[in-house]
Image: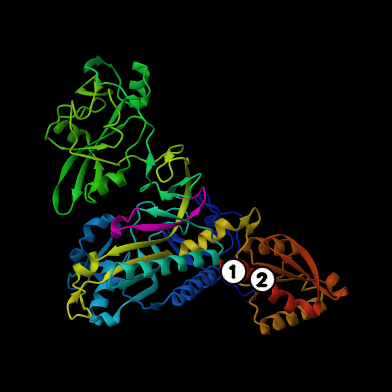
Amino acid sequence: MRMSRLFGRTLRQAPADAETASHRLLLRAGCIDQLMAGAYSYMPLGRRARLKAENVVRQEMDAAGGQEVLLPAIQPVELWQRSGREEAFGPVLFHLNDQRGRGLVLGPTHEEVITRLFADHSSSYRDLPVTLYQIQTKFRDEGRPRGGLVRVREFTMKDAYSFDLDEDGLTNSYEAMFQAYRRIFARCGVPTVPVEADSGAIGGKGSQEFIFLTESGEDTVALCSDCGYAANTEKAAFVRPPAAPEDPLSVEEVATPGTTTIEQLATLLEVPTSRTAKAVFYMAGGGGDPEEPIFAVVRGDLDINEVKLSNELGGRALRAMTDAEVEHHGLVAGSASPVGLGDRMTVVADLSIPDSPNLLAGANKADFHLRNVNHGRDWQATLVADIALAEDGHACAACGTGTIRLRRGIEMGHVFRLGQIYSEAFSADVLGADGQPVVPTMGCYGIGVDRIVAAAVEANHDENGISWPASVAPYDVQLVALRLDRDPQVAEEAEALYAELAEAGLELLFDDRDESPGVKFNDADLIGLPWRLTVSARNQQQGAVELRVRATGEDELVPRGEVADRLLALRTAALEALDPDA
């Protein structure tokens, strides 16, 4: 491709609202263009990079036994009602109606559609195991699209679905996909960490995310300093700092004027926050039932993990109570107490509460609190569970000796053990070897292809621009010819080299523009192809071409007759270096 004909142009400055390095650089390099919040056009360079990423994904999915299909993006809403996920996805789900008034949704994922497809075309245990996948556009009405290609409303996902006869079969399919994901991200130049994760609206019996660690990420993961335990903070288990053992003391009411926060209370009464009980109130909805009040209690040195709390309540959606609801349910904000609530509402206590004697808690009376409140004596939770958020410095629950460290990251892929929730909902039975019906066990496996492009840039860039990994670079080589308009010999040599390298199987971006050397070199660094060749009058006099490696900045003069072989060898070595099993 000649840059004089390339659609799009580089930018010296990125738009002010570009938040992350990948967002800024992809815009500046002319790879993407924003249409509106959460919707991007891929320019030719960006489109080529995404296709390269898709090819890596496709190669590894095929190697792992997947079969590619393509499913409709537009889906009848009845499928989502049948699975119960229309409500679970909530406002993220795009709804529309056809001309006949039939309710439709734009697919954010395809568990319902694939299960129906499987049920229509599979009838025997001989049809299993099978893994079907697609690379397709998905739609989610994100409330806050951000980070360029990281969180958008329209995106490309590779989603795969496995069907097995039993749990042992699912374990095999899951492991095959797990290893395929490990290879995909490594080959694309994106280092990832697999972490335990919450399954969210997808559901199932357990899942893992592949996280690219970066401070620009929107996910937070907990990593153990010793044993390798890793989990999203939505899921992370930890050892709570122990409370000092004490005999229960008598409850005392104490005046706490103007005290409405745990920090204020601890300061006023000169106690650590770990000697207090923190109360948070919610309304829980979903499942077709009316909303109900939830009173959650955690020790004051901890915070509520709303995902864990929701899971303990059967996945019900949570929202904070309004001031009017707080008053309606007889609670006093800033001085609320589980003492005396009785059966008026569901009370969920964190594991830290029963193990912490003589806590300070609200008196459910403005400007007053209670000393020496003890769970089991003064009040009883409806449910005691792990509902606390892991924080930096907590002890690891897996090994007991390591320390939890929190890191930011981007979720690159997610693998789920779905079980039978969808195959049961859509009656996807097959006949077993004994002639009896068997409900297949499913797995689900998603990768954000756009995120691969973004993360490849986040992981591989410098102050001058992108440094594409060889596997996903839009082109292999940027060919720069200097003073083309002034030196016919340079022009002739550049054209000959362009044709020769293309014939050898290399992909080239030829900067044939009438621009200064500085502009051409700056654009080459910004676009960031793995290798740059410079043809100039000075190099011609030496019978050589200047070769620069973008990732290292190293230059060498390569004899003219050896250029093709040198580049092919470099490309082979670069691709092998990305292969985790090479």
- Which residue was labeled with disc 2? 573
Secondary structure found at label 2:
helix
Instruction: Indicate which disc, 1 or 2, sits on the residue closer to the N terminus.
Output: 1
Q: Label 1 to label 2, Cα distance in Å?
A: 15 Å
Q: Quadrant of the N terminus?
A: bottom right
User: Is there any visible trace of residue 97 in the rendered image?
Assistant: no
- Which residue was labeled with disc 1? 473
Q: Is residue 474 above or below residue 262?
A: below
49 part of magenta stretch: no
Residue 299 in percent (x, y) is at 31, 31
Residue 249 in percent (x, y) is at 24, 18
Q: Nearer the viewer, residue 563 or 538?
A: 563
| Label 2 environment density (alpha carbons within 10 Å; few <14, some 14–19, many ≥20) | few
Name the quadrant containing residue 498.
bottom right
Q: Nearer the viewer, residue 292 or 301?
A: 301
Residue lying furthest front: 434
Q: Nearer the viewer, residue 124 or 98?
A: 124
Residue 325 in percent (x, y) is at 18, 36
What amino acid type is highlighted by mark number 2?
A: Ala
Q: Is residue 115 above or below residue 361?
A: below
Q: Is residue 59 left or right of residue 291?
A: right
